[in-house]
Image (tube, grey):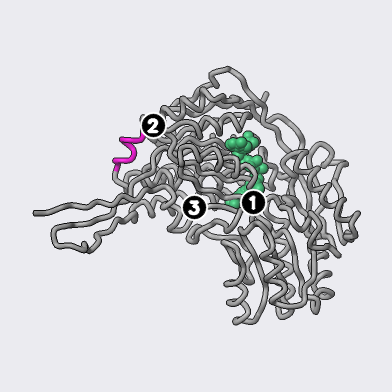
Amino acid sequence: MADVQLLYIGGEWVKSRSGKTMPIRNPANGEVIAEVPDASTEDAAAAIDAAHRAFPQWSSLPAIERGRYLLRAHALLEERKDEIARLITLENGKPYEEAKKEVQFALGYFTWFAEEARRVYGEIVPPPVPHKRLWVLKQPVGVVAAITPWNFPATMVTRKIAPALAAGCTVVLKPASATPLTALAIAKAFHEVGLPPGVFNVVVGRNSSALGDAFLSDRRVRKIAFTGSTEVGKVIMRGAADQIKRLSFELGGNAPFIVFEDADLERAAEGAVAIKFLRVAGQSCICANRIYVHEAVHEKFMPLFVERVKALKVAQGFEEGAQIGPLINEQTLSKVEELVEEAVAQGAKVAVGGHRLTSGPYAKGFFFAPTVLESVREEMRVAREEIFGPVAPVMTFSSEEEIIRRANDTTYGLAAYFYTRDLSKAIRVAEALEYGMIGVNDASGYTHEIPFGGYKESGLGREGGKEGIEEYLETKSISLWIS
Ligand code: NAP
């Protein structure tokens, strides 16, 4: 019997108003792991009501007290971190060891923003005339609707709700319909530490566009914080225009991974495997999407890379040593398969992998073999679109100027990586790449302390770092006439 969950609205656990539910399935084997309410726009409206009612009191609490709620929830979730990781593996499919790392990282946003809440400073500004005094205040934006994807069911939630709550906003969260269980477990922790009713609400439903419209059309929702595809980001941006809602977006990517001729090739191969394959089987917005190797080292680099990819263990998430889990659903799997087949038909060569895994332990899940493609050309879809799967297209280049031009020739601009031992080149290339996040000899991801976000169609605004809380604040200028 699958676990039955409820929505979290106004500090209470409730069924959807329609009484409808939907199953949550494990993408590794298709089993139903839980039933959750299938919320409608009425549920979204109730959650907005609750968040709106809670706002005056929550926003007037001293920041240090708001921070304490985050710290208490953090402590409780720390105790439950293995349980949360288990939920992530069940609903998302990623290997349990990887899920544990995600939980640890996700919880770090609670401590970071609990501390940042106390550093939301205003300003006293020198006036241009003697009879005036000027100052600038920061105030919370209001009710925030947060919409999150399935690939990091914990991190995508905490990176939004922690700064929002710390800033004094109240939140209605709509997690991805594939992975709502982690979000509900986070809500449970807030409930147990006594967060005032309505400050944080969770609605889950499969009609995401109707729920999105409910947020967009309600004037009490002042901001939408969205992580997901660029396509849906554009729909939300258009919808937000009517009420000029505040927006912050973390969208898709097409990250270049560049290996220069003077790189440490062992480290570069290690880094390429980590950032291409070992993050949710390639289903991360900052995964390397195009691998460029200087022609002078291509022959040396390929065996180092391909051997490591061959050694990766594809398995169900709880199996010992699992490194690559399933993709999230059939649609994602088919798209990856289609991109590979199309590239091969256009002349790409499969160095390893290249196909679905369909027998034995893979029979009921959405598994794709870790794949390296050679002889890829820039115009192929596999090099232009976000792959979102364990497929590494490799291309060569011959000069720094050429590779900067090619790396920047995309509508995306989230993350980029390159390997070199030349310090001057490292500075030149890092400054020339049109991306929000650059890893120089570093493909290990990012940390809470620096901002996360993209250029161009990869996003708007930043999460994390000291910028993260700014996204949830308004600036008020006060001018006082003194006599
Ligand atoms: P998605 O289809 O855009 O969905 C993301 C979220 O938006 C889900 O909660 C989804 O609900 C909801 N949604 C879908 N259509 C909507 C609509 N019309 N109005 C309001 N909400 C709507 O993206 P995804 O496939 O889940 O996630 C993968 C994408 O996210 C990739 O492009 C990836 O690069 C991007 N991503 C970016 C970052 C970053 O920080 N830049 C991080 C992670 C992921 P349902 O689940 O119910 O459809």
Describe the element under mark 2 as helix, strand or loop: helix
Using the image as rendered, state which of residue 108 and residue 380 is in the foreground. Answer: 380
284 with respect to 155 (left or right): right
Pick whichever of labels 2 and 3 is earlier in the sequence: 2
387 with respect to 299 (left or right): left
Query: Magenta stretch containing residue 327, yes or no?
Result: no
Q: Quadrant of the N terminus?
A: top right
Q: Main secondary structure of the magenta part?
A: helix
Which quadrant holds residue 35?
top right
Q: Using the image, tell me which numbered label, if any, was put on residue 108.
A: 3
Q: Which residues are magenta?
A: 55-61
Describe the element under mark 3 as helix, strand or loop: helix
330 with respect to 468 (left or right): right
Q: Quadrant of the C terminus?
A: bottom left
Disc 1 residue lies near ligand 1 with CB under 8 A = yes
Residue placed at 41% from the left, 43% from the top? Answer: 165
The residues bearing labels 2 and 3 have C-alpha atoms spaced at a distance of 27 Å
Residue placed at 24% from the left, 55% from the top? Answer: 135
Which quadrant holds residue 317?
top right
Residue placed at 77% from the left, 73% from the top? Answer: 397
Q: Using the image, tell me which numbered label, if any, was put on residue 52.
A: 2
Residue 275 rendering spot, x and y as whole percentages: 68, 60
Describe the element under mark 1 as helix, strand or loop: loop
Q: Which residue is mark 1?
A: 252
Q: Which amino acid lies under the numbered mark 2 shown in the image of this protein? A: His
